[in-house]
Image (cartoon, coloured by chain):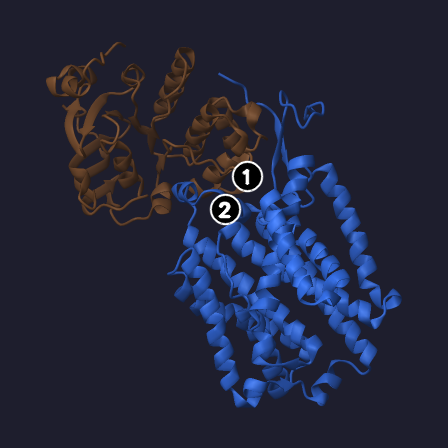
Amino acid sequence: MTAPTPFEVSQATRTSRVAGVIAIAAVAVLAAAPLWAGRADMRLLSEIFTYLALASLWNLLAGFTGLVSVGQQAFVGFGGYMLFAIATFGGIHPLATVPIAGVLGAAVAVPVGILIFRLSGAYFAIGTWVVAEVFRLVFAQISTLGGGSGSSLPVAVVRSIASGRDLREWFTYWCALVLVIGVLALVYGLLSTRRGLALTAIRDSEVASESLGIDIWRTKFLVYIVSGGATAMIGALIFLQKLRISPDAAFSVNDWTAYVIFITVIGGIGTIEGPIIGTIVFFMLRETLADLGSIYLLILGLVAILIMLKSPRGLWGFVVERFGIELFPVRRRVQVGALQGEGKAPREPG
Amino acid sequence: MAAGGRLMAILELSQVMKRYGALIVADQIDLELAQGEALGIIGPNGAGKTTLFNLIAGTVRVDAGAVSFAGRDITYLRAAERCRIGISRSFQIPHPFGGMTVFENVLVGATYGAGKGERASYGRVMEILELTALTGKANALAGALTLLERKRLEMARALATSPRLLLLDEIAGGLTEPECRELVEAVRQIRSTGVSIIWIEHIVHALIAVVDRLAVIDFGRKIADGDPRQVIESPEVREIYMGIEADA
């Protein structure tokens, strides 16, 4: 009846191509930070990178698979302790222990996931928190790792990272940069391919996803393990920079989950761009207002409430609604002969 | 009464039971569908029609009884697995993936339901969009569609999974007369490709234009099953549907 209409499917848009070029330039500038930034600036940048990575991973969990975890500090702390244990007692180069901590984090996520996936919704959230507390208590019992008061990375191990202090700081800085790029690439890679279709579908309707052949449990479980492993890597790096670890710092719900949720929610949950915007806003607020002490925290709370009321899909959700911009194009656009494509004249393929 | 000449049954429900507390929503239902057959289901609101679909598609599991598909016992198979072996459904209340485009919505069915690669599915998706008159909306977000378009999207997604059995739940409600005729034509076309169909619908004349057989459900029980015209004119059905005439 109808001859097959010629069509094209593409994901990239003009904005996204421009954004891609800008991103590459930004990475080059950031990689060269030792040339133009001081030690304090580079520390701040590292911290920004780690928060962006943590927020992107939390967003992958909560924003796409609906797994609202308030216990990701379990993996941050676990990764940190693995670094201390392996570098101190295993004699492995501290930077090499970061990926090892990731693998171990993913491995420990399997039994934890099997256990807490029996819970759903609010119960799941509380379950993750309980698991994180259990982790904290367990590590506080291990006296070789400093018990409840924690321990510092031995001087010999710190020296083995690099010869000078500057070089050591550069290495950890680059490691943070590589990790955040890796995490963003992972999230984008997951979402822009076939698996991303399933994740976005699950985000939008679980009942329909299931009746269209998507194995929801398996998809969520996979994401949980991947994000657990990546979070553990970030945790290892965080404590490689701090050079000191204690159970309270390693498994802090405020530092590794509450701020991360704040970043994701104000930036825009369920979008790749959201955590990026959120991280920028969070650090701008912190750098300008942190001296105010508890008033700073009150302001953070107010900002969160205001954004949730005025723009429930976060700042990026507001931008998308208003301008229809997409920096990380995951959407597939079809160009058909008779189709109007975003106000432009349709291009006839062939 | 059932399809003449013993064709292989694509679907068989035997003594299927489902209850929610004291409410029995499926009461010892026996139902058989032959390969390639089209069955219509009617019944008052709340009679248990959609529940029956939930039980067939695996969204809800039976309390007792058995469900088999193409000779295989699927009573304990989950919905996603049932979809992959060829049972597909549309929802009465549309469940679009609101943040995805129409094209992507259908692509989900084609990749996960039919088990094909993404690029290999593009052609099929475009064909289905054409059939369901959604080509012009391919890049629109599904969340921005009208109710009518959402219903068409339900059918498009279900079709994309390459089903052997298609369950259609009230897809004609709210359509104008010409739209309804178009829909009937589309369903006929799907049928002609060998897909077996069960169609729940209140618009009886649309149903009768397509189906070979008609079953009536009331209070979770199957009270009639057979030739559409005979079923419509049987006294039990007339009692339930007082005033509704078979006006095809």
Dot 2: element: helix
Looking at the image, residue A34 sits to the left or right of residue B81; the answer is right
* Callout 1 amino acid: Gly
Residue behind mark 2:
A203
Q: Residues within 10 Å of mark 2 (few under 14, many from 20)?
A: many
Q: Residue at x 60, y 88 (%)?
A: A89
Mark 1 sits on what residue?
A: B99
- Please count the marks in the image: 2
Residue at 45% over, 70% down? A130
Front position in the image: B219 or A114: B219
Q: Residue A93's x, y, as percent? A: 68, 81
Q: For the N terminus of chain B, which image quadrant?
A: top left
Quarter of the picture containing the C terminus of chain B is top left
Rendered position, A179 above or below A20: below
**Residues at badges 2 and 1 in contact (C-beta under 8 Å)?**
yes
Chain for colour brown: B
Q: Quadrant of residue B89?
A: top left
The blue-tinted chain is A
Residue pictured at 65% horizontal, 62% vertical: A297
